[in-house]
Amino acid sequence: MKTNDRPEPTVFVIFGGAGDLTWRKLVPALFDLSQVRSTPANYSIIAVDRVPLSDEKLRRRLHEGVNRFSRFGKAKEAEWNQFAKHIHYEQGDFKKLQTYQALGQQCAKLERQWGAKVHRVFYMATPPVMFGVIPNYLGKAGLARDREWARIVVEKPIGYDLESAKALNATLSANFDECQIFRIDHYLGKETVQNILAFRFANPQFEPIWNRRYVECVAITAIESVGVEHRGGYYDRAGALRDMVQNHLMQLLCLVAMEPMVSFEADEIRNKKADVLHAVRPIYRDAVHQCVVRGQYGPGWIGGKKVVGYREEPGVPPDSQTETFVALRLFLDNWRWQGVPFYLRTGKRLARQATEIAIQFRGVPHQAFPAESTLDWQSSRLVMAIQPDEGIVLHFQAKFPGPKMHLRSVQMQFDYQTAFDASSPDAYETLLWDIMRNDTTLFMRADQVEAAWRLLMPVLDVWAAAPPSDFPNYAAGTWGPEEAQSLLAQGHSWPLPAELADICGKKGKDE
Ligand code: BG6
C-alpha cells in the first residue's frame, strides 16, 4: 500500500551514476520506493559519470541491478518501464565547471517543464577523492545556494582521520549549510536501529532501569561471516576501526546511551547523540593496549567451506597489517553511565553474522535462594537483535517446575517477522525517502563525525606506531582473537549470538 505524504518534485543528481553503489543500492532503493510509497509526481534521476553511455545502456544495466537487489525480487516489466523513463545519463568530468553548469541548465529546464520549483539532491556516490571536489564546483555553479531546495549527500568514509574529516566538513560547509548536508550512515536507516528509540522512549518500564544502578555492562556486537569480498583495495587502507567503529558502532552506542529527547526534531535527537560522544572517556595513548584489541583473520572454515586468510584476499598485500577485527572497552563519564563498561566488537570472517546490543543487568542486591537453587544462574539480559535476526529478547530467571526451588534462565521475545506482517524497507529506501522529505534526523552531523574521530585518533596513532607482530591472530570461522576476552571484567562475557538465533527459530547467515 502506498503512503500519501508525497514529496515535492525532485531531481536526483547522482555523481558516480555508472558506479557500483548506484547499481547495487541507490537505484534498487529508489525503484522499491516507487513501488511502496508515493514518489514525487515529477521526478528525475540524472546519473552523471565520466564514461560514455547512452540512456538506454544505463537503464539496461540498472534494470539488471534492480532485478538482483530489489527487496521485491525481479521487477515487473511494466513497472520497470514506467520507472526507467525517469532515468537519464549525463556524461561529464567532475573536475570541470561545464559539467555543473549543464546540470544547472537541466534542472532549470525541468522546472519550466513541470511548472514548479524542484528539490535538487546532489548525491556523491563517487570514490572519496571526489568528496572534496564536487561541493566546490556545485558552489561555483550556484547550485548549492538555495537552503531549502538544494542538498548534498555524502557517503562514508567521511574522512580518513580527524584532520581529513575536518577538511571535508569545511569544504561541505563552505558551500552548503549544515541543514543541507546529509551524511549517510546506513545503519541509521535500519528499522531495528530506529526501533532502539521506540523501545527506550515509547515504553515507561525500561527507562527507569536504563542506568548505572541496574545495568552491569553493555555489549555492542556487529560481526560478519563474510570477508572483504571485492573491496580489498579500499578495506586494506581503512581497517575495521575506520570501516565500522568510527561510524556504525558509535551510532549504535549513541542510541543506546543517549538521554531522552524532548521532541522528534532532527537537531534535538542529534544533540542528545552528540552528548554521548562527548561523554566517552578519552582513550589515552598509554592505555590503548588495555582498552582495545585488534585482530586479522587467517585461513579457516566457514559454513563447511575452506576460506583464505585476509592476506590472500584479492587486492590485499601479503604482509598487510590491517585489522579485520576490533574490540574496545569504553566508559561514559556522565551521571547515567558512570562506571558501566561498554564493550564494542566488530570483525570479518567470524563464526556467523550478527549485529546486536546486549544489556546485562546487575544481580539482585541480596541472594536469598539456597546455593543449590542457583546452579544454572545466568545474568538477566536484554538483547536487541539488529540483524539478521530482528527482535528483542529478555532473559530472566524462572522457577523450574518441580518440588524444589530451582532457578533457570528463560526468555521472552519479540520477533519482527512474527509481530508485524510487513517486510522492512531496506536502509537506503528509508534514507532516500528522508532526503527527499528534507529530514536530517537519521544523518550524521559534522560535530558527531568529528567527535567520533577525535575519540579514536589515539588508537589509530598508537597502532600506526606499533604494527602488530602476531597477525593473523584468529582463524576465519572463529569468534576472533582470544585477547578480546582480556577486555572483559570478571563476570562479564561477550554474548553468544547463536543463542538468539535459536530462540527466534532461525539461523544467522553463514556465508
Ligand atoms: C559497510 C562496511 O559500511 O557496512 C562494510 O564498509 C560492512 O565493510 C557493511 O560489511 C556492513 O553492513 P551491513 O548492513 O551488512 O551490516
Image (spheres, rainbow, N blue to C red):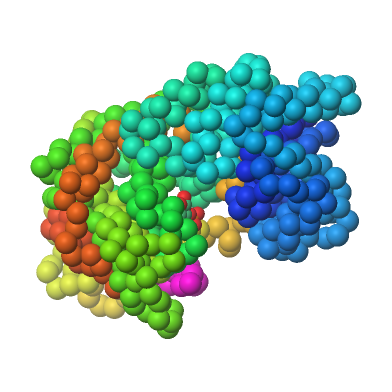
Q: In the image, which residues are magenta?
A: 498-511
**Residue 76 colored magenta?**
no
Q: Is residue 309 visible?
A: yes
Name the image quarter holding residue 235: bottom left
Query: Residue placed at 48% from the left, 24% from the top?
Result: 171
**Residue sitting nearer the eye, 320 or 399:** 320
**Residue 500 colored magenta?**
yes
**Residue sitting nearer the eye, 356 or 102:** 102
Task: Estimate the x, y position of residue 479 in percent, counting from the top left.
Answer: 30, 68
**Residue sitting nearer the eye, 70 or 240:** 240
Q: Up-down: is 254 above or below 397?
A: above
Task: Estimate the x, y position of residue 290 in percent, counting from the top left.
Answer: 13, 50
Task: Estimate the x, y position of residue 409 in percent, counting from the top left.
Answer: 30, 67
Q: Up-down: is 258 above or below 305?
A: above
Query: Residue placed at 65% from the left, 25% from the top?
Result: 97
- Position of 181 with respect to 301 (left or right) is right
- Position of 125 with respect to 404 (left or right) is right
Task: Estimate the x, y position of residue 158 in percent, counting from the top left.
Answer: 44, 37
Q: Is residue 325 visible?
A: no
- Position of 14 with respect to 53 (left or right) is left
Query: Residue placed at 34% from the left, 77% from the top?
Result: 300
